Amino acid sequence: MAPVYTTDALTFIRMEVPEVARPWRVEYPGAMHHVTAHAVAGQDLFLVDGDRHKFVSLLADVHRRWGTLFHGYCLMSNHYHIEVETPDGALSRPIKWLNQTYASYLNWRMERRGHLFDGRFKSLVVDADTYLHELSRYIHLNPVRAGIVPHPADYRWSSYRAFIGLTAEPPWLATGLILDRFGHAEPHRRTAYRQFVEVPGEVIIDPLQEALYGAVLGTQQFADAIRAAFAPATATRDVSRHAQIRPRTDLETVCAAVTADYRVPEQSVREKGRHRREARDVAIYLAARSCGHALTDVGAYFGHVGGSAVCQTCRRVERRLAHDAQFRQRVEQLASGLENSSPALDTPIGSTHAGER
């Protein structure tokens, strides 16, 4: 008999909001989401392994098109779970594209018509500082709770095997932010994460049962800030209100801080070139990750490069952050200085995401 697993007693926020025709979305740059979608009428979403391979390939396409980062996934028979980070704030567009493209593929393969998914996808905004690793455990234990496998490492169609080092990580899968909670040294942090997931306990909480209508997973303070900024009475659906949550340091200030710290001219940071320059990479990373600017805006400011190039630069910096303590200290000091230069917040949320992705 497979063991039953538990999560720690973190706060799940259940928020009652006025009845609306459609659930409201929370979207802002740097937001973290738990996204799920089910097949209509309990039908199978994935019939053969080829369908699962197709869906995973579409996750890679979403990453290339929008710069979306996936911090974990699990494909079940009639639904899926993904942990999604939106560097530029867009959630609805990429997930709609994912679902519509997969539905078109499956209808074509099965020679049929009609809806595949049961309405809109569901999304919960997540407090990454307190709950992301718990959500990762919940997602990776889905096949165990369903009785499909006795251990999560036995299941091929989730990101768990990549997290614990049994398979290679695809470039669109960002394991570093979660693994950083368990240390920076390899392979010890992967071993620690595996122990965290597989230690048996009493019961595991289903976040979808604890959250309703654009709910929040995190602390009360985090939930209050989200509700104040995004509740339907004060904000329209699918509209970024990030400035109300975490004010951004402008790109000029980011560039000036980095050029002063590295003692290099602004031109060498803003203009793209054939050779990689550490100061330029750090400036792009801070602008996109710490300050939450849209990838397209960052790319336009730093030499009119594309969003995918900005993502590649961020991953390059994050890989170095994971093993170079001196470099990490320098970047953290710059990020702290930029944070202090922003207007103060009564209820700050969000954090700098450092670590290999």
Image (cartoon, rainbow, N blue to C red):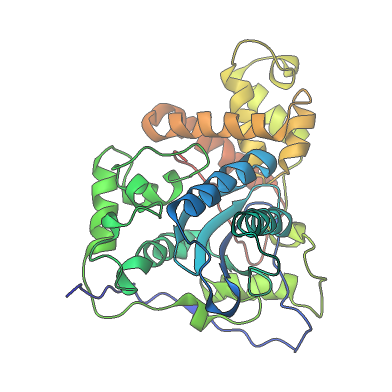
| Residue 47 placement, left or right of 258 | left
Residue shown at 50%/36% (left/top)?
171
Q: Which of 254 and 98 lies nearest the eye of the viewer?
A: 98
Residue 38 in the image: above or below residue 340: below
The single residue placed furthest to the front in the displayed view is 111
Q: Which of 252 and 93 lies nearest the eye of the viewer?
A: 93
Residue shown at 37%/61% (left/top)?
140
Q: Quadrant of residue 84?
A: bottom right
Q: Which of 72 and 324 lies nearest the eye of the viewer?
A: 72
Residue shown at 29%/53% (left/top)?
193
| Residue 341 placement, left or right of 167 | right
Where is residue 1 drawn, in percent x and y? Answer: 16, 75
The single residue placed furthest to the left in the displayed view is 1
| Residue 4 placement, left or right of 59 | left
Residue 347 in the image: above or below residue 353: below
Where is residue 279 drawn, in percent x and y? Answer: 60, 21
Where is residue 315 drawn, in percent x and y? Answer: 53, 34
Residue 198 in the image: above or below residue 270: below
Residue shown at 37%/48% (left/top)?
179
Q: Quadrant of residue 321?
A: top left
Where is residue 160 drawn, in percent x and y? Answer: 35, 53
Q: Which of 155 and 81 lies nearest the eye of the viewer?
A: 155
